[in-house]
Image (cartoon, coloured by chain):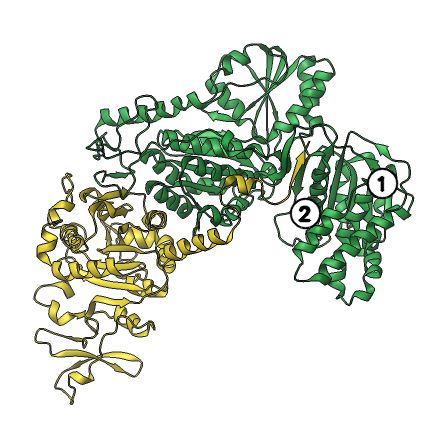
């Protein structure tokens, strides 16, 4: 496809596609990341979109973005700042300029820089002056008029023609990073096999953009060589899909059918959608009338002997609290997934936060302990969902799995596991060999009760939300209640036998230990790696098990001079650690902007702590 | 038939070892007896029954049944029961609920269970009062009822269970009196045999907080004149001496006296519980004393697709058509690539 000018090689690069929420930026970004992944780059992506399906056109509030960080080296985060910003309108520049590297490239649709759009974006007259754009490499491409020209003989209506603008921009970026168009072309052929003219129009726009970039000399192509990664089969996976698949894998290992009872809620809906599509694996999906019915139906299915799950986000977790208490009391296995978003209340539905930790741990009436897990990367959602289900089944308990909006929608390449490598799951079914069946008779090691599935002769029994004796008789006796409260607490504590020890990344001792949980993983790892490279005695630990905590927490913490807890809330995990391990002093790094950390933020704050 | 059954299960086999703790004289005792009698007639093994309830006096019911049972949380029994039935369609699933549990806190779950037509049998104990919390008005209390939370009378319209069920596109609705054990037993058997959500409203007496609320129509002396027991295919005739009946007068039902104004039995409406059009069923469910007799029996029993059967069939069809047979297949499906 024509000769290349001098190619620059780089270790990694960050690209951000942005435009109106109707401009197709999420598709553009995911097509680019698929191509990069197939090329062999390591990568992480982060979609950032408004809550409204079609927010006011042309405004900053309506800007939808998709960021990709790809590299020749291992990539842990979607990157703090973009090397290349693709902006389909002035608002996209306005919204993203502070996240663009000084000296970076901005490709924008010149045709969309009308007086009206400039004003809508909040500029007075001239974005170049007002946002000091001269410090960037500006490529003003007449994208709208070019696609009109390229598709003029196609007989498509003007709206459809303009809808291919994103592909023109994608074509330009492909040329810039020396990528093949093949995979994207195949995507359109498959997607629009019934509408070949739409497939062709998109392919023409894509190629037109590619050749346009080649023709203008404003760009020098950049090459990011494939990353050195472990051999094997790979695929790209998002956190929500990984969560759904982890649950499916657990169902297969436990030889149970999977039941999901859920109600759609951003950003968790993807889990319900994925599982609803998996009827080929026998999933029974139930879109309930509300959050409460979702978990209650799941609990009914659990009573009837299925692997039951419910997926939600913070407001939905609040609605499910009473039913989680019922699951605690009836000691039935159930996995509750909370894809955290900005709160309280409706809050910031499409933005990420880690502020549901206390709700997950303590947001119920009575002494109501549950197991709480947190996933740390999109693909880690698979492992954590699998473990959540394994614990729920083998210990007969509700398990809350915390992910977040950043993990749910972010994608990364994932080495495909083999089912034979995953541990077995053994449901503790009661049998009618040992009668009478006592509903609250417990396993001596785990303290969990046995699962008597309706349909089994001889095991007829009654459970419910009222306090019971070991026989299942309702009891308000003071001593019995205290006994049962303590047993339920101890049962959860004994899950610790399944909790792996904390692994310190970096030296086992040092000046500063960075502590975190969940989705802040990548940013902490990168910040700590960079500080280690600069000679600092700093290490990082990530908690995937929140309750119970790993056994070696105190031992690990004691080997560092300072401990800093880094989380996207006002300090919920720090406070939890203060309660559990009061002998240590905890510094905090917090952020509540609905956005992930940046590596720079963590580094700067860690440096201050190291200097003190 | 009785002989064959008696060698199998008896009502006693369905009694659990728990002491029944409802107030002496409470209508719930009779409902429990009727249900235990009905189950015997179904020929279903005991381990295949699951009784699910919410919160309220009636919701203690599962504890008194020697079957599988789940005493849930307030209002949510429809959702729990739906989950149980969908998980295992082989089970005979019964939901025990009251007017507060099903129609106030659980109203949403109730109408959606009915709409989905999950094959569960819902017995709704309607005593028009909150019993367990000791005497507050309920969503079925008549306008003006004086209770602890309506000391000057309620100022709200009550729900009518049958109209709500039909409005939610319900396919089975029946009404009975707690004290009429033989009618109730027959209705529970029909409800169990009906495929889809069956709702049975029991006009039940709360002896403590709303004693005699149904007495105007259910009282021994008056019930034959003030209730109409519907039977499919039979004329809608009622009265102590079977002298009254219903006819359609324009767009309304009208009570007529046989032998008066030339009215004979052939003029009386014949009950068709299987008619999909809900018009007449709705009017029958709506009837109130004194203008009309209160309709008892199976008012509506229309067949239709059930949720769990359609879901199971869908799963089987998709399984047949899909190339993905297990998790390894799924993990390696779609866009994958090899790193050497």
Q: Is residue A155 above or below residue B46?
A: below
Q: Position of residue B4 (x, y in %)?
A: 11, 55
Q: Colour of chain A?
A: green
**Nearer-the-camera pick, A341 or A71:** A71
In the foreground, B148 or A55: A55
Left or right? Give the position of B285 relative to A217.
left
Q: Dividing the picture into quarters, in which one does residue A375 lie?
A: top right
Residue B76: % across, % down: 34, 47
Q: Is residue A353 above or below residue B115?
A: above
Q: Which mark is residue B252?
A: none
Q: Which marked residue is nearer to the observer: mark 1 or mark 2?
A: 2
Chain containing mark 1: A
Circle 1 residues within 10 Å: few <14, some 14–19, many ≥20 = some
**How far apart are labels 1 and 2 at the CA level?**
25 Å
Q: For numbered disc 2, what is the local secondary structure?
A: helix
Q: Position of residue A289 (x, y in %)?
A: 43, 52
Give the colour of chain B: yellow
The residue located at (30%, 40%) in the rendering is A453
- Judge whether residue B138 can be spotted in this image: no
Name the residue: 53% across, 43% down: A268
Q: Is residue A121 left or right of residue A298?
A: right
Label 1: state its secondary structure: helix
Let me know if residue B5 appears in the view: yes
Q: Position of residue B11 (x, y in %)?
A: 12, 49
Same chain, labels 1 and 2: yes
Q: Given the image, what chain letter belongs to the residue carrying mark 2?
A: A
Give the farthest residue toward the bottom: B262
Does A560 sit above or below residue A417?
Answer: above
Provide the residue designation for mark 1. Answer: A133
* Left or right position of A357 against B21: right
Pointer 2: what residue?
A26
């Amino acid at each position: 496809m024509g000769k290349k000018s001098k190619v620059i090689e780089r270790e990694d690069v960050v690209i951000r596609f942005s435009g109106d929420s109707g401009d197709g930026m999420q598709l553009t970004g995911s097509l680019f990341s698929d191509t990069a992944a197939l090329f062999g780059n390591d990568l992480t992506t982060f979609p950032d979109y408004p809550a409204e399906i079609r927010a006011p056109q042309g405004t900053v509030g309506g800007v939808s973005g998709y960021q990709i960080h790809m590299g020749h080296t291992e990539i842990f985060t979607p990157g703090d700042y973009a090397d290349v910003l693709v902006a389909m309108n002035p608002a996209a520049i306005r919204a993203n300029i502070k996240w663009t590297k000084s000296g970076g490239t901005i490709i924008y649709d010149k045709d969309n820089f009308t007086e009206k759009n400039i004003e809508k974006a909040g500029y007075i007259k001239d974005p170049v002056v007002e946002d000091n754009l001269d410090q960037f490499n500006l490529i003003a491409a007449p994208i709208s008029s070019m696609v009109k020209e390229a598709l003029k003989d196609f007989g498509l209506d003007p709206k459809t023609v303009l809808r291919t603008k994103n592909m023109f921009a994608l074509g330009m970026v492909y040329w810039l990073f020396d990528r093949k168009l093949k995979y994207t072309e195949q995507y359109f052929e498959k997607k629009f096999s019934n509408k070949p003219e739409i497939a062709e129009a998109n392919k023409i726009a894509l190629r037109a953009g590619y050749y346009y970039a080649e023709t203008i000399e404003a760009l020098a192509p950049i090459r990011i060589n494939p990353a050195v990664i472990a051999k094997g089969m790979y695929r790209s996976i998002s956190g929500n899909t990984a969560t759904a698949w982890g649950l499916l894998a657990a169902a297969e290992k436990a030889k149970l059918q999977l039941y999901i009872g859920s109600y759609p809620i951003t950003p968790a809906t993807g889990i319900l959608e994925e599982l609803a599509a998996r009827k080929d694996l026998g999933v029974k999906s139930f879109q309930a009338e509300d959050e409460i019915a979702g978990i209650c139906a799941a609990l009914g299915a659990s009573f009837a002997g299925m692997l039951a799950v419910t997926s939600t986000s913070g407001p939905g977790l609040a609605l499910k609290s009473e039913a989680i208490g019922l699951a605690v009391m009836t000691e039935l296995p159930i996995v509750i997934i909370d894809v955290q978003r900005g709160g309280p209340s409706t809050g910031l539905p499409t933005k990420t936060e880690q502020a549901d930790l206390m709700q997950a741990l303590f947001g119920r009436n009575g002494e109501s302990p549950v197991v709480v897990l947190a996933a740390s990367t999109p693909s880690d959602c698979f492992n954590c969902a699998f473990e959540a289900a394994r614990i729920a089944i083998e210990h007969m308990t509700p398990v809350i799995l915390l992910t977040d909006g950043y993990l749910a929608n972010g994608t990364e390449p994932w080495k495909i596991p083999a089912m034979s490598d995953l541990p077995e799951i053994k449901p503790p079914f009661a049998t009618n060999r040992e009668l009478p069946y006592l509903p609250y008779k417990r396993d001596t090691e785990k303290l969990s009760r046995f699962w008597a599935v309706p349909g089994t002769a001889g095991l007829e029994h009654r459970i419910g939300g009222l306090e019971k004796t070991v026989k299942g008789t309702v009891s308000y006796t003071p001593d019995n209640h205290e006994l049962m409260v303590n047993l339920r607490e101890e049962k959860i504590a004994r899950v610790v036998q399944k909790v792996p020890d904390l692994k310190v990344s970096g030296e086992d001792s040092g000046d500063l230990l960075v502590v975190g949980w969940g989705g802040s993983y990548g940013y902490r790892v990168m910040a700590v790696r960079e500080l280690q490279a600069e000679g600092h005695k700093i290490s990082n630990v990530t908690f995937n098990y929140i309750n119970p905590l790993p056994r070696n927490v105190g031992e690990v913490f004691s080997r560092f001079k300072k401990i800093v807890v880094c989380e996207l809330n006002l300090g919920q995990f720090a406070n939890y650690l203060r309660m559990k391990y009061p002998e240590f002093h905890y510094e905090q790094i917090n952020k509540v902007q609905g956005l992930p950390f940046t590596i720079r933020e963590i580094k700067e704050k860690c440096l201050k702590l190291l200097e003190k | 038939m009785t002989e064959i059954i008696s060698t199998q299960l008896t009502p006693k086999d369905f009694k659990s070892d728990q002491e029944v703790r409802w107030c002496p004289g409470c209508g719930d005792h009779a409902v429990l007896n009727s249900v235990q009698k009905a189950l015997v007639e179904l020929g279903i093994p005991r381990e295949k029954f699951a009784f699910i309830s919410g919160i309220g006096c009636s919701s203690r019911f599962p504890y008194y049944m020697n079957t599988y049972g789940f005493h849930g949380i307030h209002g949510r029994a429809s959702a729990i029961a739906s989950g149980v039935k969908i998980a295992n369609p082989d089970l005979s699933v019964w939901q025990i609920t009251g007017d507060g549990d099903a129609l106030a806190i659980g109203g949403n779950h109730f109408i959606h269970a009915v709409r989905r037509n999950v094959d569960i049998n819902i017995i709704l104990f309607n005593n028009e009062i909150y019993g367990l919390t000791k005497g507050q008005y309920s969503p079925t209390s008549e306008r003006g009822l004086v209770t602890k939370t309506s000391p000057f009378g309620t100022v709200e319209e009550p729900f009518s269970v049958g109209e709500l069920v039909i409005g939610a596109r319900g396919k089975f609705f029946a009404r009975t009196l707690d004290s009429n054990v033989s009618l109730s037993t027959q209705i529970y058997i029909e409800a169990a045999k009906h495929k889809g959500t069956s709702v049975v409203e029991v006009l039940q007496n709360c002896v403590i907080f709303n004693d005699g609320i149904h007495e105007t129509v259910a009282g021994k002396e008056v019930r034959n004149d003030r209730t109409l027991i519907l039977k499919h295919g039979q004329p809608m005739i009622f009265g102590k001496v079977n002298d009254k009946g219903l006819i359609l007068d324009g767009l309304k039902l009208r009570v007529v006296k046989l032998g008066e104004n030339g009215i004979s039995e052939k003029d009386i409406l014949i009950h068709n519980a299987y008619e999909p059009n809900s018009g007449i069923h709705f009017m029958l469910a709506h009837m109130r004393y004194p203008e009309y007799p209160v309709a008892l029996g199976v008012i509506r029993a229309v067949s239709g697709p059930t949720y769990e059967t359609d879901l199971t069939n869908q799963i089987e069809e998709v399984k047949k058509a899909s190339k993905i047979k297990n998790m390894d297949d799924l993990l390696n499906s779609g866009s994958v690539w090899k790193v050497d």
